[in-house]
Image (spheres, helix red, strand yellow):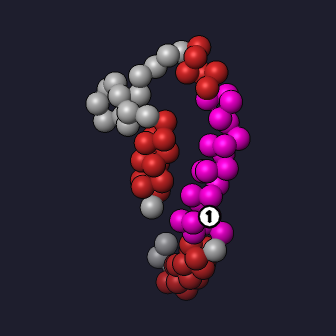
Amino acid sequence: MKDTAYTWQLRCRWKALRQTTISIDNINHLIDSVTNLVNEARQRHFQRWPIHLSKPDPIPASYKKEISTLKNWIA
């Protein structure tokens, strides 16, 4: 990271990718698609292990809020 030419190229590449491939919109779309993909498994999981997401306190009270918290953390 002491090579300024390298760090400049790295910064430019990061900015370019954040506007396209790893933009917040693309990451949120990926999270939503995976959420839809695992929906049936999620339901079976909570039937088998009835965990309450509201315990312990910092954990969101629902799966939907958990996904929202993840998206906010990534942003």
Figure check: 56 above or below 27:
above
Crowd tier of the residue under label 1, counting other residues whose Cα lies within 10 Å: few below 14, some 14–19, many 20 or above: some
Name the magenta segment's main secondary structure.
helix
Query: Disc 1 on helix, strand or loop?
Result: helix
Apparent side of residue 43 relative to residue 2 in the rendered image (left or right): right
Q: Which residues are magenta?
A: 21-42
What residue appears at the point 61 percent right and 26 percent down from the top-left corner?
43
In the current view of this chain or complex, which residue is farthest to the left?
A: 57
Spot occupied by residue 70 in the image (x, y as percentages of width and height): 47, 48
Verify whether residue 14 appears in magenta.
no
State whether residue 56 is above or below residue 37. above
User: Can residue 10 be seen here?
Assistant: no
Q: Residue at x 68, y 30 (%)?
A: 40
Write the residue at 59% across / 59% down.
27
Residue at horizontal 64 percent and vertical 21 percent from the top: 44
Residue 35 image-quadrant placement = top right
- Residue picked out by circle 1: 26
User: How many numbered marks have been drawn onto this rendered protein structure?
Assistant: 1
Q: Which picture quadrant has residue 13?
A: bottom right
**10 or 54: which is nearer to us?**
54
Closest to the observer, 9 or 26: 26
